[in-house]
Image (cartoon, grey):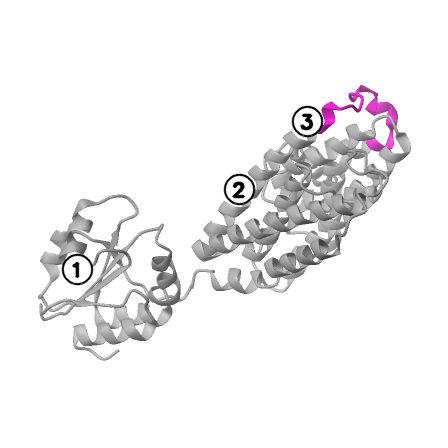
Amino acid sequence: MLTAMLAAFAGGIILNFMPCVFPIISLKALGLIRHAQRPAQTRKEGLGFLLGCVITMMALAGGLLALRAGGTAVGWGFQLQSPLVIAFLALVILGAALNLLGVFEVGLSMQRAGEISVERGAFVRSALTGALSIIVATPCAAPFMAGAIGYALVQSPAVALAIFFSLALGFAAPFSLISLFPALGKALPRPGAWMSTLKHGLAFPMFGAFGWLVWVLAEQAGTTALAAILAAAVVLSFAAWLYGMAQRRRIAGKRHAVLFAVTAALTLAVVIPLPAVINNGAPLQTMAKVEEVKWSPQTVAQYRGHGKAIFVNFTASWCITCQVNERTSLSTQTVREALARTGTLYLVADSTKFNADIDDAMGELGGGSLPLYVVYPADGSAPQILPQVLTPTIVVNALAQASGKKT
């Protein structure tokens, strides 16, 4: 147990330098430099960071152990297996990046408008930085850490929590020691105007972390979730800009209540519908298996009129209507089951990049634009062109008619 605790502590220290944690840790580094010459404030921030790390780590470890005790096979970092958690983390990190760029300020007071050394709320901000660091750190596995966690997960809850507590202490140790013992921070550079440039520069690692989380979300929940998070990012950025404008107007003694209200409304408009959109965008696990075959004129000629209906989906990734039809009709369980039951050959003609054969085929079929959906009957008769806006019923009925089978 002691060996595992020491390994966890060492792994926690090394975790500070892992790529997935560095963007968040850089925020704490900025805070230390900001208050390097003010021991009391530095201790306050260090204690907040330590408590944020420990409390969040113990909460995650407790949740992990409870789920495993209930028979759920989850491992460390289980919270990042949730697309919804990923989406909210991405938006939080985007907000932090915009804050670093000066779009708006957190804890801004009338007396310290525009200054970097904002003290109000420093303890809470440091605690939240620690919490966010722990949440984002879980996908990483530093040296010594994997073995310690593996050991913890097969021990009693008390032993496991002790090991995770040691991991949290190791993670928080570098900044906490410098904060709590000011003599260690004498080597830090003195605060100055250069910190404004550093603050702005640190926004870009945060944008990188945002991009990484968006990529993870797309891998987990598909293109619908990707579109939702990108739209939410645009609206949230606009809300942050309005909030910053309202802060500046308040400081100048001008009317600002309407801007604050609009900011709140936009933020709610982003947050409230996000769970439903993200969850609906998750790939269906019980979907009927239908093989998607790449379209070519030769494939159509080979199978047409030989007892098998053919459905051709002329699409492109940049075609918004195509993507809507894909999500609302073509990828639904009803349509997939109909394709499987009728034995229809499903061909995809992807026109994301220029393809002369696809353009020629669309011209011959009388379709001048995407999307274009064509059903070739099993008996080789004339193809049927479906509407550009699909419903599952339209597709299912067309497949039944083309194959001569009831769906």
Q: Which residue is mark 1?
A: 366
Total of numbered circles in the picture? Answer: 3
Local secondary structure at mark 1:
loop
Q: Quadrant of the C terminus?
A: bottom left
Within 10 Å of the Cα at label 1, are there few (<14), some (14-19), or many (20+) other Cα atoms? few
Q: CA distance from mark 2 to mark 3?
A: 22 Å
Rendered location of residue 311, percent (x, y): 22, 64
Q: Are marks 1 and 3 in contact (CB under 8 Å)?
A: no
Residues 253 and 384: in front is 253
Q: CA distance from mark 1 to mark 3?
A: 58 Å
Q: Quadrant of the N terminus?
A: top right
Whether residue 51 is visible = no
Residue 196 highlighted magenta (yes or no): yes
Going from the N terminus, do you reach mark 2 or mark 3 first?
3
Magenta residue span: 179-197
Task: Inspect the image, locate mark 2, and give the three-letter code of the amino acid beneath it.
Answer: Gly
Residue at horizontal 80 percent and vertical 35 percent from the top: 176
Return the residue found at the far front. Answer: 254
Residue 289 image-quadrant placement: bottom left
Rendered location of residue 312, percent (x, y): 22, 60
Residues 70 and 195: in front is 195
Magenta segment, prevailing SS (helix, strand or loop): helix
Task: Inspect the image, locate mark 3, and give the three-letter code of the amino acid beneath it.
Answer: Thr
Within 10 Å of the Cα at label 3, are there few (<14), some (14-19), or many (20+) other Cα atoms? few
Going from the N terminus, do you reach mark 1 or mark 2 first?
2
Rendered location of residue 69, percent (x, y): 65, 61
Q: Are marks 2 and 3 in contact (CB under 8 Å)?
A: no
The numbered disc on residue 211 is: 2
Residues 1 and 324: in front is 324
The numbered disc on residue 197 is: 3
Residue 396 highlighted magenta (yes or no): no
Within 10 Å of the Cα at label 2, are there few (<14), some (14-19), or many (20+) other Cα atoms? some
